[in-house]
């Protein structure tokens, strides 16, 4: 733990925010930052946005599988490829 003047400066810089988490534009706008900053999510994760999600496993095998998901809904296993490690990509936010 820093001590002295360095500790005071550190405490003033870190006041009011979580230490170790980068300040993001979303946080600056007063919205909660998404834990996953990309537009992809795995099954079992909460959807960061409402919209159309596409199964990347199906896409890479030449099949198109899209689902509508509401924000904070848990992303399911893909009904087409039935892969237990499905990755969903947000194609179009609504």
Image: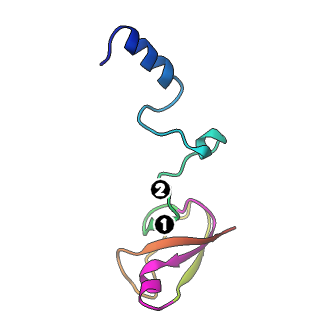
- Front in this rendered view, residue 85 or 59: 59
Q: Residue at x 36, y 81 (%)?
A: 83
- The magenta span reads 47-63
Name the spot of residue 7 as percent of width and height, x first: 38, 14
Name the spot of residue 15 as percent of width and height, x first: 51, 22
Name the spot of residue 88 as percent of width and height, x first: 48, 72
Q: Which mark is residue 10?
A: none
Q: Assess whether residue 52 is covered by the magenta stretch.
A: yes
Q: Is residue 14 found left or right of 53 in the rendered image?
A: left
Q: Which residue is mark 2?
A: 36
Q: Is residue 90 above or below residue 58?
A: above
Q: Quadrant of residue 48?
A: bottom right
Name the spot of residue 44 as percent of width and height, x first: 43, 65
Q: Residue furthest bottom?
A: 62
Q: Residue furthest top?
A: 4
Q: Is residue 32 above or below residue 2?
A: below
Q: Callout 2: few (<14), some (14-19), or many (20+) C-alpha neighbours within 10 Å?
A: few
Q: In what element is the residue under mark 1?
A: strand
User: Is label 1 in contact with label 2 (beta carbons under 8 Å)?
Assistant: yes
Q: Which residue is mark 1?
A: 40
């Amino acid at each position: 733990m820093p001590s002295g003047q360095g500790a005071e400066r550190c405490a003033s810089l870190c006041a009011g925010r979580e230490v170790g988490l980068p300040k993001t534009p979303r946080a600056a706008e007063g919205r909660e930052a998404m834990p996953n900053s990309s537009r992809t999510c795995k099954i079992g994760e909460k959807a960061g946005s409402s919209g159309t999600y596409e199964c990347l496993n199906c896409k890479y095998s030449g099949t198109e599988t899209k689902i509508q998901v509401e924000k904070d809904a848990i992303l399911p296993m893909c009904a087409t490829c039935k892969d237990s490690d499905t990755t969903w990509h947000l194609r179009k936010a609504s």
